[in-house]
Amino acid sequence: MIEGKKILLGVCGSIAAYKSAFLVRLLVGLGAEVKVIMTTSATDFITPLTLATLSKTPVSLDFVKNKEGEWENHVELGLWADLILIAPASANTIAKLANGICDNLLCAVYLSARCPVMLAPAMDLDMYQHLSTVENLSKLQKYGNQILDAEHGELASGLVGQGRMAEPENILEHIKTFFQNKQKLVGKTALVTAGPTHEQIDPVRFIGNNSSGKMGVAIAEVLANQGATVHLISGPGVKDISHEHISSHKVKSADDMYECVNGLFDKVDIAVFAAAVADYKPSTVALQKIKKSDSTMNIELIKNKDIAAEMGKLKKKGQFTVGFALETENEEMNAMEKLKKKNFDMIVLNSLNDNGAGFSLDTNKISIFSVKNEPRHFSLKTKKQVAEDIVDNINEHLNA
Ligand code: CTP
């Protein structure tokens, strides 16, 4: 699982830097290719020679490689890695990374890398609890980095508390799980709908809604990170995404989204309907801008196709479909009704009554209902974490 994986280890100035040597040995022992970048202060705690010997590769320390002025290509290093692990991650480096500061090689590699990044913080307990550190770590997590929480125990200061870098064996377990997860959906194809649809009234006006598409995009990313080939069908305003396993299909109206989904549905194993599709569209689209005249105006609306329900009719054995329900009242009952009516295997309920849940926000609070399992209720989490919970539940059903 770890064999052949390219792991870039960033080592910062902390007494825990000695543990990096064990980490390198464990990773190399399992067949990983390891390259090490050290910050200047890391070299006060452990020598580059130790890590170069254990990793069997010269350690990178600065933008300039040697006296001849040869350049250490930070972009190349970032692109080389399958995973960047910063262990120990000091309060200083965490603050720099959280704020885009780029005054050393490690920061530059971090900023230019496309692969996932894990950080194992190490510092004294008060530094770890300081609001600025807490905020910086939460920022990094929001940017998609994984934080391996510091462990509790005796610290270099003599104080006892949380701040010790996670033990190398525990870090190794995280890395194994990470690479294992990457394999879970290899060979599977998925489609995800995301965002709003715009239903044109005239050339300059439309009916839309506040969906940002963040939830659907996060789900597409998690599915792709686990190896699935993903088609992301997104409405206007949804952010562009670049991922080797994601094909992006941009659509505007519910009709466009239907056409796109209908063309792909037959080929997919998993379909997640996260879009906030407009239920109605104007019965006619004015060819010219409508001029104001009377004091009131009526627009006749007709029903759009229900994409999820239509696909539910076409669903074949082996296909797994997931719907969303956004409810303000009788939440569970409405969600269960939609599950049956649209022939979903699983439905994700988010209630607008929950603080922190809903359109545009970065957090969400969900419950999952399925045909087979008891309802599951989750706490308020970032949309990325929610996406992971949803995909975990999909995997559980696929493997049942
Ligand atoms: N959906 C869809 N096509 C539509 C409407 C909804 O694919 N035209 C999908 C949504 O993506 C979601 C599920 O159906 O997965 C439920 O959407 P929701 O808007 O909550 O339900 P509706 O069926 O539209 O019912 P209502 O608006 O009356 O609650």
Image: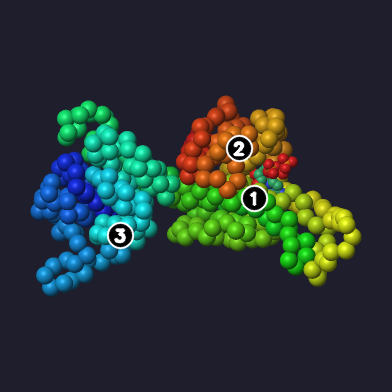
**Disc 3 and disc 1: Cα gap in Å?**
36 Å
Residue 210: which numbered mark, if any? Answer: 1
Q: Could you give the CA–CA distance between mark 1 and mark 2, rounded to whole angstroms?
A: 15 Å
Of the four image quadrants, the one with ligand 1 is top right
User: Does mark 1's beta carbon lie closer than 8 Å to ligand 1?
Assistant: no
**Left or right placement of residue 15 versus residue 269 in this view:** left
Q: Is residue 231 above or below residue 394?
A: below
240 shown above or below 372: below
As drawn, the residue found furthest toward the right would be: 294
Q: Which mark is residue 399?
A: none
Q: Going from the N terminus, do you reach mark 1 or mark 2 first? A: 1
User: What is the basis of the colouring in this image?
Assistant: rainbow
Secondary structure type for disc 2: strand
At label 3, which amino acid type do we have? Answer: Cys
Is residue 310 visible to us here? Answer: no
Mark 3 Cα-neighbour bin, 10 Å: few <14, some 14–19, many ≥20 = some
Q: Residue at left 31%, top 45%?
A: 119
Residue visible at 83% across and 67% down in the picture: 291
Is residue 235 shown above or below 353?
below
Give the labeled residue for mark 2: 350
The residue under the point 29% across, 57% down is 107
For label 3, the SS is loop
- Seen from the viewer's position, the closer of residues 111 and 277 is 111
Q: Is residue 203 visible?
A: yes
- What's the amino acid at mark 2? Asn
- Which label's residue is closer to the chain start, 3 or 2? 3
Q: Position of residue 210 (x, y in %)?
A: 64, 50
Q: Position of residue 242 (x, y in %)?
A: 47, 60
